[in-house]
Image: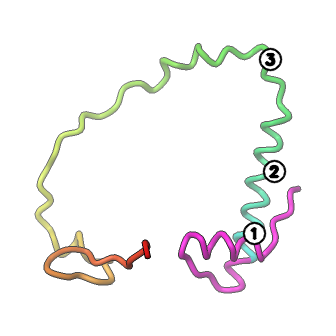
Amino acid sequence: MEHVSVEEVKHIAKLSKLSFTEEETLKIAKEFEAILTHFKTIDNLDLEDVNLNEYDEVNTEFRKDIPQIFEDKKKLMQNVKNLRDGGIQVPKIIE
């Protein structure tokens, strides 16, 4: 299993502007390790005889993108931390 340190998780969280408790950080480190283990397993698969081009036609049908008016603005904004003049105020990320 690949080892992911708590410091690496904290660094990634800082870059992502996220904050976690120590317990959450340990849990996320273990989850990252599991994900990296899956990638390592995939890397070790022999895909020499697999023709990836034959999968190009799979799931090519998407729903139509039809614009609709969302009437319930209160529901739309229920999880917004800061509103200003009817818009969502976000923290400044560029200095």
Q: Which residues are magenta?
A: 1-25
Q: CA distance from mark 3 to mark 2?
A: 21 Å
Reading the image, the residue beneath label 2 is 37
Name the mark on residue 62. Answer: none
| Image quadrant in which you'd find residue 69 | bottom left
Q: CA distance from mark 2 to mark 1?
A: 12 Å
- Dot 1 surroundings within 10 Å: few (below 14), some, or many (20 or more)? some
Q: Position of residue 81 (x, y in %)?
A: 33, 83
Marks 1 and 3, the one that precedes in the sequence: 1
Q: Quadrant of the C terminus?
A: bottom left
Cβ atoms under marks 3 and 2 closer than 8 Å: no
Name the mark on residue 48. Answer: 3
Q: Is 18 on the left or on the right of 85, as rendered?
A: right
Check residue 20 for magenta coloring.
Answer: yes
Marks 2 and 1, the one that precedes in the sequence: 1
| Kind of residue at disc 2 | Thr
| Image quadrant in which you'd find residue 22 | bottom right
Instruction: State the residue in front, 15 or 38.
Output: 15
| Kind of residue at disc 3 | Glu
| Kind of residue at disc 1 | Ala
Reading the image, the residue beneath label 1 is 29
Q: Residue at x 14, y 49 (%)?
A: 68
